[in-house]
Amino acid sequence: MWAIYCMPIPEHSHVADRTLLRDGVFLRLREAIVDGTFAPGEQLKDGELAEWLGVSRTPVREALLRLAHGGLVIAQPGRSTMVSTIERRAIWDARDVVAAMHELAVREAVPELAAPDIAAMRDANQRFAAAIEAGDVDAALRADDDLHGVPVAVSRNAALRSVLDQFTPVLRRVERLRFASLDGRASFDRHEELIRLCSAGDADRAAEVAFDTWHSLPTSVDEGGGAGNGADSAGATEP
């Protein structure tokens, strides 16, 4: 018989803890930028952030570099780091990429969607409608994420998820504007059409609706989220 030897597991390994810490700091700082805790143009000091979060400076510095890569902060080595302003071009670029990724996710996912997946999308849209009616933008964002997250998860496309993780946060600030406006109610109808087409197995049309839903986001804070930013704005001229 062959002897089976197991690799000994170190008793004091903290690699997973360090990874979770880095990710946690990154997500917390990203959330604080997206929800307006840190305003555009505000200077971010790693020492103050580390004290606020109760961590060392190292994971904060790593998080700021990741946030800079995603366009949420502007990092100047050896100088200051500040929250990026909501620039039309950055939103325009991120919107195009995110819309294309959701279009691809839906196209890949529709043939694989099962009844529980459709039910999860319907449930998310009902929660979305309730949040919009209550004026709860944070709850609306969570429900919107849950709805669009179903086809993303079913697609099992890791590269697609990576791109969305990088660029979706750039759009969060204009998403908040949409969901705080009358156009937030129109999003419910877009979702309903997407769900209907997914349920019917119409991958091409469902993918088009997914693209238009994201591509209809306003491209600046001046546009807000109201009239004139529906799916027809997808053909707008780049500034």
Image (cartoon, rainbow, N blue to C red):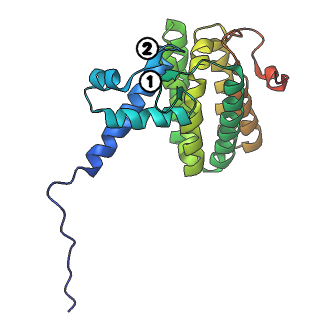
Q: Amino acid at mark 1?
A: Glu
Classify 203 as above or below 55: below
Q: Quadrant of residue 93?
A: top right
Left or right: residue 237 compared with residue 49: right
Residue in the foreground of this view, choosing between 96 and 88: 88
What residue sits 68% from the left and 29% below the top? 95
What residue sits 20% from the left and 79% below the top? 5
- Quick check: marks 1 and 2 in contact, CB under 8 Å? yes
Residue 122 shows up from this direction: no
Q: Kindly give the residue lying farthest to the bottom in the view shown.
A: 1
Q: Position of residue 152 (x, y in %)?
A: 57, 42
Left or right: residue 8 compared with residue 161: left
Residue in the foreground of this view, choosing between 135 and 48: 48
Classify 116 as above or below 225: below
Q: Secondary structure at mark 2?
A: loop
Classify 56 as above or below 14: above
Residue 31 badge = 1
Q: Position of residue 98 (x, y in %)?
A: 65, 35
What residue sits 60% from the left and 46% below the top? 160
Q: Amino acid at mark 2?
A: Thr
Q: Position of residue 172 (x, y in %)?
A: 56, 22
Classify 212 as above or below 201: above
Q: Residues within 10 Å of mark 1 (few under 14, many from 20)?
A: some
Q: CA distance from mark 1 to mark 2?
A: 8 Å
Q: Kindly give the residue lying farthest to the front in the view shown.
A: 78
Residue holding disc 2: 37
Indicate the quadrant containing the N terminus: top left, top right, bottom left or bottom right: bottom left
